[in-house]
Amino acid sequence: MEPITVENDRRPVVAVAGLGFGAEFAPIYRDHPDVQRVVICDGDEEVLNRVGDELGIEERYLSLEDVLAQPHIDAVHLVTALPDHGEQSIAVLKSGKHCASTVPMAISLEEMSEIVRWERESGKNYMMMETAVYTREFLHCQELFQAGAFGPITFGKGVHYQDMEGWPSYWEGLPPHWYMTHAISPLLRLLDTRATTVRCLGSGQLPANRQTHYSNPYPAQTAIFELEGTNVSIEVSRTLFQAARSYTEAFSIYGENYGFEWPQIEGEPPVHYMLKEANGRRGRTIESLRIEAPERTDLLPLSIARYTQDSVYSDGSHSSFIQGSGHGGSHPHLVHEFVTSIVEQRPSSINAVVAANWTAAGVAAHQSAMNGGETVHIPSFELHPAPAG
């Protein structure tokens, strides 16, 4: 193998921008063997210096603009405010840097299209860092699915229940399905497809003071999607406010021979349903078992494998980490996929087209809800080849 030199070193210098939840990712990049080094960025100087001192990271910036002006920085992982993801991702790609972004990709179809265009024109990688398709539970289900255990698929369901009381003000009144990707992406990944049409209804009523920002009256939304190339339909429900339900990001999928169901309460093992025998017209015998999903540290470099187990930074006090139960050990898998896609010069597993197809489904669903449940056709984005990560 050719020795690594300054001239041929493809290992990126990665900037993590946004050190609330982003502080969970900085040490994973720091310890990844294919990252030259990690730099950090946050507009709060006290937070920037505290995280930098704690993690031993010397290179620090107070603005994304400063990061983008540095020619030696190869990639940026955005862990910033939700309304800014689209504009900032476009800026990163335009600057000639690879871009990873926390979900959702954007909140408008126009911004999604621009990200797809700039990924193509810049020649740089984009990756939406969707935790739901790298949890230990999803990876276990995916392995069974690819082995053919399920048989023909009949139905799938995704839910994401979350109480956003006390979160930053930009969450106030957010259309629930604009933040749908955690609930729909596992189903679309397993079925290797995209949603083509949606019918969605809103539920409940936000008080007037919570409708001012986005003109959205609904604390909850439920959608039914048709999928490309299959006769399977899926249902996705999302709440953000006014629902007395503990947090869950969940999906269930049912085939003729096997079913997988996320637990009702986070932290419990998923339920697996297995067809044991058919009993003619009197029904079938189906066994149900709770099965702990195995850790897939075998998919990771040894230096970051331990980060599937627990909080990475400090005590894991950020709300995204606490409410998401650590996101199923997904964080090092996401970092590894983004980094290796850059080093191997291939599209990421959640490239701009895949991310746009997943995110646009939620934008279209909200449009349907605002029009009394009318059918909305979801735009298709040009497909790039992407490995099933």
Image (cartoon, rainbow, N blue to C red):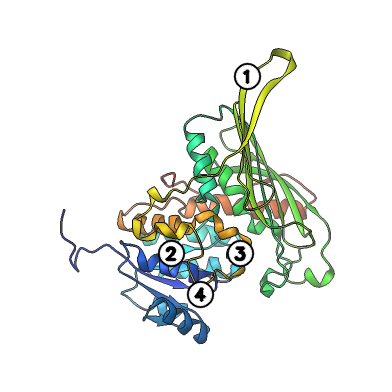
Snapshot quadrant of residue 155? top right
Where's residue 25, x and y in %? 46, 66
Where's residue 42, x and y in %? 49, 79
Question: Is 383 on the left or on the right of 186, as rendered?
Answer: left
Provide the residue designation for mark 2: 99
Where's residue 372, x and y in %? 80, 50
Question: Tag 1 or tag 2, which sits nearer the N-term?
Answer: 2
Q: Which mark is residue 322?
A: 3
Question: Which residue is at the far top?
Answer: 280
Question: Which residue is at the far left?
Answer: 2
Question: Is 359 on the left or on the right of 264, as rendered?
Answer: left
Element marked by disc 1: strand
Question: Tag 2 or tag 3, which sits nearer the N-term?
Answer: 2
Label 4 environment density (alpha carbons within 10 Å; few <14, some 14–19, many ≥20): many
How far is mark 4 from mark 2, CA to CA? Answer: 16 Å
Nearer mark to the viewer, of 3 and 2: 3
Nearer mark to the viewer, of 4 and 2: 4
Question: Above or below — where is 92 with respect to 196?
Answer: below
Question: Tag 3 or tag 4, which sits nearer the N-term?
Answer: 4
Q: Are marks 2 and 1 in contact (CB under 8 Å)?
A: no
Question: Which residue is at the far bottom?
Answer: 46
Nearest the viewer among 209 and 20 is 20
Snapshot quadrant of residue 85? bottom right
Q: Are marks 4 and 2 in contact (CB under 8 Å)?
A: no
Q: Residue at x 55, y 62 (%)?
A: 111
Q: Which mark is residue 277?
A: 1
